Amino acid sequence: MKIQYKIQDNSQLSQREYYSLHNQKSVAPPLDDEFYAQSYELRKAASTMTVAAIEWFRSNVGLLLEGGYSGSLQDDTFSVLSIGSGEGDIDLEIIHSMIPRLKPRWKRLRYVALEPNAIHRDRFLQRLDQASFDESVEVCVRDECFEPGRLAGEEKFDLVLLTHVLYYFDDPYQAIRSALTQTKEGGQVFIVHQTATGIPQIQQEHMLEAKGNQNEMFTAEDIQRLLETQSQKHQYYHVDARLDVTECLQRLESGVKIMSFCMECDLRQLQEAKFAKILQAFWRLAEIEDSGRAFIQEPIGVFVLKTTANPTVLERHPEDKDPVVDYWQLAQRFDWSGTFLSQYHRGKPSSLRLLDVACGTGRWLQAFGRYIQLDEEIQNLVYDRLDPCGSSIAQASQKILPPFQLGDQYVSTIQEAQLESNSYDLLWSMHGFYMVPPQDLASVLKKCAN
């Protein structure tokens, strides 16, 4: 049966109707604690945002663990700081996903969650009591706020999570910088945040009129601009999600609560004319399915920020006479050590195999040896060379030093090379792909990925 989108003619007034008749205001008041808690639960249940975030973390658990590979091998504990963990539903799923992937690199997992809201913290603790973790997993839920500029204790972490919390900081970038400061060398910060699509569009149009200000309006696009302005390197992932607004369009009590949470004020007490404008905006964005349910798209963004594992080399090596600075700069602007170590633990025991596409005379390999110090655990690193010029390969071969070992050579272009599938842990190409014709690029990339 399809849902009818109209106010039902009941003898008893809904809360929305009651407030409209008796207590209308030109500006809606803030949400009180009880109404906030009710609205939060309804908003959360109506959205796929949490489920989508959990699925993304499950699918990318290897990426979560990458930052820890750069640390000392004597440290056998992977540590996580979750800032504003809420009820812990996402956090507990992350923990469950991490546990099977910890060994052999780590023996223990330490997970510290900061949550100042007593209701959310208690629910996290209740969920934690129901979870079954062995003694290798330690979870600590603290009654604390994260204060930018002040470390949350002396401990530093392999991974710091900021999940839907940057709205609440006066200076979001200061919070991001502080989170980076809280990570170990080579660690990572993950930020999960709502994009500007969906509810933020309605907030942009109506929040000022509804509540008198636009505080806490902050989207993934704002984060993107902040990071780019500060030249902060990062990776970005788009994750689809949507909000069920069926009850909102019907003006049911539960729907008004969801709308109130979205607009961050008690819409039950807002003037009818202003409420009607907000409702029209929900209608405008809603997509109504054949089932009669109505949804507004509200994708989220995931940002991954890494601290530098290798110390910045301010001066070039005295023996570095290369006419360009490209390789020197490349050596210090990427976490090579962490990348090699993570692949080392994923691959066959005690071995790595690397293919250098368009290796040339080995200029990049030589710079790598001068500026990058790989973890001493990596002993067997087979280096294969590919280049259409045999004399160039011969010169590159003279520059192979431990831990690299001489492997196979291919005097060929990457398009014509007969490569064994699934044989390489790593593949790099420095200034080589400009020689690939545009029409061949897709097939070449596919070959490299296989």
Image: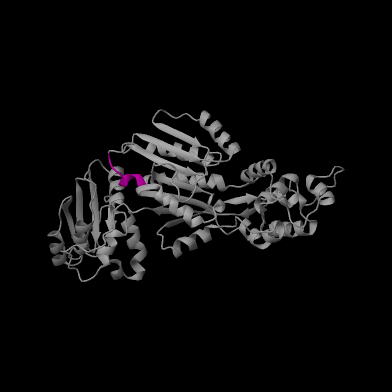
Give the residue drawn at x 24%, y 59%: 356
**Main SS of the magenta segment?**
helix
Q: Is residue 65 above or below residue 27?
A: above
The N terminus - image quarter: top right
Along the horizontal axis of the image, is 84 left or right of 282?
left
Q: Is residue 415 visible?
A: no
**Nearer to the camera, 443 or 404:** 404
Q: Position of residue 85 (x, y in %)?
A: 52, 42
Foreground of the two, 377 or 361: 377
x, y percent for residue 444: 32, 62
Placement of 402 over or under 77, stated as above or below: below
Q: Is residue 208 left or right of residue 241?
A: right
221 vs 285, nearest the viewer: 221
**Residue drawn at point x = 53 percent, y = 61 percent:** 222
> Residue pushed farthest front?
150
> Vertical placement of 359 versus 305: above or below?
below
Residue 442 x/y as whole percent: 37, 63
Magenta segment includes 253: no
Residue ranking furthest to the right: 11
Picture coordinates of residue 174 (x, y %)? 47, 55
Q: Which residues are magenta?
A: 66-73
Could you say which is closer to the camera, residue 168 or residue 158? Answer: 168
